[in-house]
Structure formats: C-alpha cells, structure tokens
Amino acid sequence: MAACIVGAVLLLASAGAPARPAGSAATAPAPTSVPAGNLNYLHTQGAKIVDAEGNEVRITGVSWFGVETDTLAPHGLWARKWQDMLDLVVKLGYNAIRLPYSNELFDPSLQPQGIDYSLNPDLKGLDGLQIMDKIVEGAGQRGIKIILDQHRPTTDNQSKLWYTDELSEDQWICDWQTLARRYRDNDTVVGADLHNEPAGDATWGTGDPKTDWRLAAEKAGNAILDVNPNWLIVVEGIEKTEDDLGNVMDWYWMGGSLQYVRVAPVRLKVPNRLVYSAHDYGPSVYLQGWFQDPDFPKNLPEVWDHHWGYIAKEGIAPVLLGEFGGPSVGDDPDGIWQRTLVDYLQKHGISYTYWALNGNSGDTGGLLGDDWQTVDQGKQKLLASYQDRMLAVANPNAVDEAAVPQWHPETMRVIKALHQDKQDEKWTKTMLPEVYVDNKGKEPLSLTNVEVRYWFNPGGDGAALGPGNQTVSVDWASIGEGAKDVPKDKIRTEVVADPNGRGVDPLYYVRITFADGLSVPARAALGVRLRITNKAGGLYFQEGSYSYRQYHWPTEWDHVGIYQGGKLVWGIEPQVWDAQQQQKLAEKQARALQPRS
C-alpha cells in the first residue's frame, strides 16, 4: 500500500482500491527506489541529458495540448484517431511529447468532450485520467517519451503562482506524487514539468514561501522523488526579476527568466535529476524591446544567453526550451526570430518541446492546420533540421490504476468571470471585450440577481468625460457548448461612474444585468461581447483599463466582477486590488531592510 501525505492531505492507493478512492488514514512506507533493470529512464550529466546506458539524448519534441482544458483529452480527437496522431509524431521525427494537464482532470464528475467516438471507440466511457493512460501507453509503444506538464489548476485558467484559492500548495504536491506513483514503473513518462509559466508575484531565491518559486520547486521536486526517484524534475523560470525593494529590473516571458540560477540553484535530494526549462516567444505574441533593436536578429543570442542559455553553455544543468513557436518561419521578424532560435538550440545542444502540435493554437498556430490533417511544411522543415533519435521504452503498459489524485470539490468556485479580448491595440476608438459568466456548478445558475462589472478608463479629453459620453452596446450574446445565441434584448447594459474612483483618474464600469428567466446551464458559460465607444470620438487607452487583458480564448479573470444579490462573489474591485499591491510592495521593502541570516 502507498499513501500520499502532504500536511493534512492523504491519498490512498492500494491494489484493492476503487477507481476513485476516498482519502483515509494510513501510514506511508519508507520510499523505495524502483529497480532500473532494463527500463530506459533519463538522467543528467552536467548539462547533458542521457539515457539509461549513458548515451546523450536531446529531447526534440512537441506539446500536444487539450487535457488541461474542459475537453479533458488531447485536442484534435474530433478529427482524427488518437493512434494516428501519435503515428504522425513518429513520422515527423519527434521523440517526446509534453502533455499539459489541469488538476481539474481529477474531478470524477467530469466527462471528456470533443471526441468523435466513431473515430476513437476505445476512448468511449473513459474519464480524462484514463485517456491520459491511453496516450501514455500508445506513446511508449512507439518510442515517444512523455513529460507531464501541470499547466493549470483548473480548466479555466493558468495561474501565475503554483497555488491558488482552489488548489493549495499541499494538494499540488500531493497530486504530483500520485501521478508519480501511477506511472512509476512506466519508462514512457520521464519527467514532471512542475508548473507552467510562473509569473506575476513569483520570485526566485527570496526566501518568501508565498512567492519563492525556487523553494516551491525544491519542495515539490523532492516530494516527487520520494515516490519516483527516476523522474526528471523540470523547473521553469519566472517572468521578471526585481531588486530587494520590489523594483522590476527586467521583464521577460512568463516562465522564461532563469537569471538567478547561478546564485540560487534548485537543490534536489536525488542527484542528476534536475532540468531547467524556459519559454520563449516571438514578436507576434508580444513586441518585446529586443525585437525593435537595430541589431536584430544578431542581438538575440545575447538575450537568450542572459536569461537561460548560460545554464547549458556553462555546464550547470540541462535546459529544455519547453515552449516556443509562432505563425511564421519566413523572412518577417517572427520567422527570422524562430529560425535564429532553432539554430541557437542546435548549436548548444539544447532540448525543446515545440508549441504546438495542435492545429488550434490561436496566437502561434501549430504544426498542423485547422483541419488537423495538413502539416505546415515550413515549420516541419525548420524543426526537422534539429531532431534527435527516437528513444527506447521497455514498459509502456505499466499503470497503477489505483493511484488516483483525490478531488476536493469544496475548494472549487461555482461562479467565475471569464474574459477574452483579441484586440491588441493600446489606443483604440472602440473597445470590444468579451465577458462570460461561467457556471462551474452541477445545477443551472439563475441570472436574475446577477450583475457583471467591466471597469475601464474613459476616452476623450475633459469635455468628453462623464458616463453620459460613453456608449455601450451588445454585439452578441451566446450560451453553452455550441454557442447558442441569446437575444440581445435579454442583456441590459449601462455605463456607471465608480464612486470610489481610482487615484486621480476617472473610473467607469459597464454594468451588465440580465432579463428574468435567463440562466446558465451546469458546466457552461454565457458570453457577452461589448462595444464601448466615446461619443466625442476620443481614444481609449486599453492597457490602462483595469479590466482589459489581451487574450485569445476565454479564461478566468479576477479584474471582472460578478455580484449576486448585491454581494461580490467573484473578482477583486480595483481599489482593493490597488491596496493589495501597495501592501505587497511594503512587505517586500520591509523584508529588504531586515538583516540576512
């Protein structure tokens, strides 16, 4: 019998346990190492990754996303057989798949969606975790290694920190331990990408347990190695570096900055298991300053050396570029960046998992087209110029089906606001945000007493200010899977001046209410696209508006408020958020003045 105990959290996994075991008291036995035998696990030597026989391996793979979304399965299975997708990975020459998941995968009440069961009849009746088992087994049978990626705490959103109100740090670690046990004897799964894209308040080496990602990665990595000492522990970077007073010194990509590894390396109890990972993107995702440098693209290697490449070049540890990708590999800036990056990876022997195999990666595009059949030959030719050999898997079918992470429904929020805004202009005459009321519950949600607030700064000069000079209308409204239209007269909107303000600038919000009788079905969302304009034709500065965030798909966003019966049930009001940021800054400054031990 094996048990996962982290703080007060315990998971039971025994041979006679049911498919979805409940927690119960037990004592964990001392961890034992899995005999290597002929299992082909990977480990590290300096800056190299090597196989069980000590031969150097470069992971040259792809990400195949979907399990982390509400489909609970890799995307594209509405268009192809899952076996065909894996065959394609082999045909295209990739030796690994980075497989994202969300912890909501472990909710036993959820069923996978978006699967054509006439194409994939063997998936019918399986839950999301069992589908993951199928992918693992099928990948291993083809010599494809798997790196599991904790991409999101829930299906709605990535989180900047490794814990949230819905997923505690203890549960995050316990879920990882259970997955490590589930695949402990299966040398298809070779690594744990602990948390996708630490960002925001995440720090490195500060010693603050609330924000220090390096400490959290050590804690989680060592807990995983207690259960499965054969896995690689993949630790991503953070988004930005700050001085002791909280002043930002350098902004990079989320999960991309590993500048402090040299002075504060991750310390694991099992040697030769640590791999650092960065994410890097091009100007089509965000126009960073280095893309506008007159020396572009000659300046790029120096940028990469500074943020993550030095780790491999100086022999500190291996680096896996866990995500990179873009729509172009041509002669435009995005294509030049992408081609220069692949050349850099090859020159320095750095592993990668390209983003993404999918045909539906909105901001980068994928290796496959929208039809999930057509291969982007330009991208494939580029990546094929740097690919390593396929890797042996000895035991692809080993799955401990009794090891299932325990689900804690009491921590989940029933009502959330989702947000999407594809318009990336800083200054615009018309704002076009999409806001969603997401019902995560098992029963329909009545909208009779529900109000949604989208906060923004007014456009125009002083003469054009005031709520009366702001106009708002509804472009469309839809509900549920398949986006069933909702009559626009069921959605009421008005612009209101926020009486609390926000500093010296005026602050308004669009107040959205709903006609009586309108409700959101269980596990569905109602979306509304707003059109906000200024009567005088003044421009809005979108990036300065509290509720604005450019995003290509609906994700949860706490800068949109939901009120039920007049009470705030989701989100953070602007004044409260501002006060929280001031408090965090004060805490950082106070810590900076304390003597160091």
Image: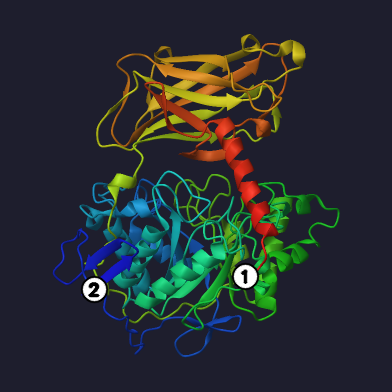
Residue 73 appears in the rendering: no
Residue 452 appears in the rendering: yes
Q: Quarter holding the N terminus?
A: bottom left
Of labels 1 and 2, earlier in sequence is 2
Quarter of image, res 65: bottom left
Mark 1 crowdedness (10 Å alpha carbons): few <14, some 14-19, many ≥20: few
Q: Position of residue 305 (x, y in %)?
A: 72, 68
Q: Which one is in front, 495 or 100?
A: 495
- Location of residue 241 with respect to 417 vertically, above or below: below
Q: Which residue in the protein does label 2 denote?
A: 27
Left/right placement of residue 427 relative to residue 64 reads right
Q: Position of residue 4 (x, y in %)?
A: 30, 68
Left/right placement of residue 40 relative to residue 131 reads right
- Location of residue 116 with respect to 48 vertically, above or below: above
Give, as a three-letter code, the residue at label 1. Answer: Ser
Q: Which residue in the protein does label 1 denote?
A: 385
Q: Position of residue 334 (x, y in %)?
A: 69, 52
Give, as a three-letter code, the residue at label 2. Answer: Thr
Q: Which one is in front, 23 or 81?
A: 23
Left/right placement of residue 300 relative to residue 497 reads right
